[in-house]
Image: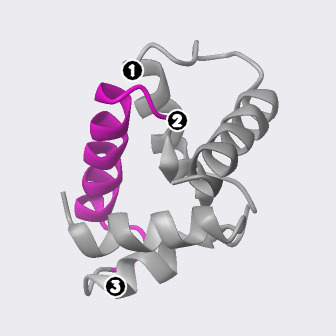
Amino acid sequence: MEQVIYDKLQAVARAHKLTNYTEMGALVGLEPHDVRLWAMLDEINQYEHEYKRPMISALVIAKEENRPGSGFWVCASGLGKFIMGGDEDRFWSDELRRVWEYWASH
């Protein structure tokens, strides 16, 4: 896991904000569509899942779409949190709320 990305996500969560793939990639010298960035976000989500925390990468959105990219849903499905074809907007808003609530006190 790339610690600089994880640290930034925690700061964004505590500020009750969102970030984007461009900003996250710039932290580690990667383009927003680089699979290595996505792999780091997946690894962070897996780590969070092990500790029963919400998916902190819910904070990362594609600027063009103003929501997470498709990899977010694939990761959520792989973690058993989301059923593909389900209500993406509802899942995302619920997960954002859980992220902000958790990190507000940590």
Please name the amino acid that badge 2 sits on: Pro
Front label number (2 vs 1): 2
Q: CA distance from mark 1 to mark 3?
A: 26 Å
The magenta segment is 31-53
Residue at (26%, 87%) from the top-left corner? 29
* Residue 63 coordinates in the image, percent (x, y): 68, 72
Label 3, secondary structure: give it.
helix
Q: Which mark is residue 27?
A: 3
In the rendered structure, the answer to whether residue 95 lies left or right of residue 54 reads right
* Residue 12 coordinates in the image, percent (x, y): 58, 70
Q: Residues within 10 Å of mark 2 (few under 14, many from 20)?
A: many
Residue 30 position (above or below residue 76) = below
* Residue, disc 1: 79
Q: CA distance from mark 2 to mark 1?
A: 11 Å
* Residue, disc 2: 54
Label 2, secondary structure: give it.
loop
Q: Quadrant of residue 4?
A: bottom left
> Which of disc 1 and disc 2 is earlier in sequence?
2
| Residue that lies at the very extreme toward the front in this rendered image | 105
Residue 5 position (above or below residue 69) = below
In the image, 37 versus 106, the foreground residue is 106
